[in-house]
Image: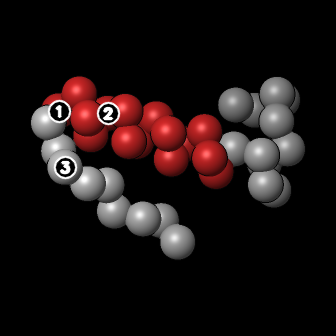
Amino acid sequence: LEGNLCRCTGYHNIVRAVQQGQAAMQGSAAVASAE
């Protein structure tokens, strides 16, 4: 993500979406919140 998005706010939702997608593909019901 370096150089593409503002790291101060821009990538949190993208990272969360990737984590949720990974959990869904692995059959997990929930992903721990980073907040």
* Quadrant where the N terminus is found in the figure: top right
Numbered disc 3: secondary structure: loop
Per the model, the C-alpha gap separating discs 2 and 1 is 6 Å
Q: Please name the amino acid that badge 3 sits on.
A: Ala
**Mark 2 and mark 1 residues within 8 Å of each other at the beta carbon:** yes
Q: Position of residue 9 (x, y in %)?
A: 79, 54
Left or right: where 11 falls relative to 31? right
- Snapshot quadrant of residue 20: top left
Residue at image mark 2: 22
Q: Please name the amino acid that badge 2 sits on.
A: Gln
Q: Residue at 26% across / 54% down in the picture?
A: 30
Residue at image mark 3: 29
Per the model, the C-alpha gap separating discs 2 and 3 is 11 Å
Rate crowding at label 2 as few (under 14), some (14 to 19) or many (20 or more) other CA atoms within 10 Å.
few
Q: Tag on residue 26?
A: 1
Q: Please name the amino acid that badge 1 sits on.
A: Gln
